[in-house]
Amino acid sequence: SSAKVTNLNADMLDGKHSSDLAAKAASAKNIPVTTTSETIIASFTPSADGNYDVKAYVHVGSNVNVTVKVEFHDGYNTQTTFMINNQNLEVGGYSLLPAYIFAKAGQTIRIKAAASASNIVAVSASIIEL
């Protein structure tokens, strides 16, 4: 309809501005794990306490043991959630189950990956504010 609606603000939905609806996120695409030490794939430091979804995809070029974990602070302690823990993976791509976390403001959320051999694994990951 071309009818004008009085007091309609198209930038607002349920009292929130459109910029409030965009999730603050960190995202990384196809980051190679170049050593057998832990590699930070993505990180995000929230400005307010909040709930987050952490998602990851692992690409494996040769059979290797892989670990992907999320480190964060929930207001009580530093927590580590393993998305996959030293699991042997064959050549292929793997979508890991997401982790749902609560993180404190000012405390960095980190997605880390490690592999038993270098230059065989690449990880894509996102941290999404809910």
Image: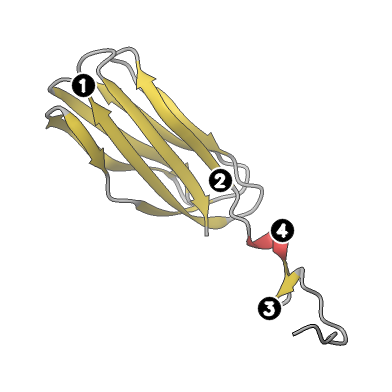
User: Split into 4 quadrants, where in the image is the N terminus?
Assistant: bottom right
- Residue 99, image x and y in percent? 35, 51
State the image coordinates of residue 32 (x, y, percent, origin top left): 36, 20
SS under mark 1? loop
Across the whole image, how many numbered discs are drawn on residues?
4
Going by the numbered disc 2, the residue's amino acid type is Ala
First along the sequence among labels 1 and 3? 3
Tell me the residue at 48%/51% (across/down). Answer: 74
Q: Is residue 101 left or right of residue 84?
A: right
Question: Is residue 78 placed above or below 86 in the rendered structure?
Answer: below
Left or right of 89? Residue 24 is right
Q: Are marks 2 and 1 in contact (CB under 8 Å)?
A: no
The answer to whether 83 is drawn above or below residue 76 in the figure is above
Secondary element type, mark 2: strand
Q: Is 12 displayed left or right of 80 in the figure?
A: right
- For residue 79, which quarter of the picture? top left
Question: Vertically, is 53 above or below 9?
Answer: above
Residue 16, quarter of the rendered image: bottom right
Is residue 61 placed above or below 89 in the rendered structure?
above
Residue 75 visible to an observer of this rendering? no
How far apart, in angstroms, are the residues tagged by discs 1 and 4? 40 Å
Q: Earlier in the sequence, mark 2 or mark 1?
A: 2
Marks 1 and 3 sit apart, C-alpha to C-alpha, by: 47 Å
Task: Please rate how many residues cluster around mark 1, counting C-alpha atoms within 10 Å: few if below 14, some from 14 to 19, many from 20.
Answer: some
Three-letter amino acid code at the position of disc 4:
Ser
Residue 12 position by quadrant = bottom right
| Residue bearing the label numbered 1 | 61
Q: Which residue is mark 3?
A: 14
The residue labelled by disc 2 is: 25
The residue to which callout 4 is attached is 19
Q: In the image, what residue type sits under mark 1?
A: Gly
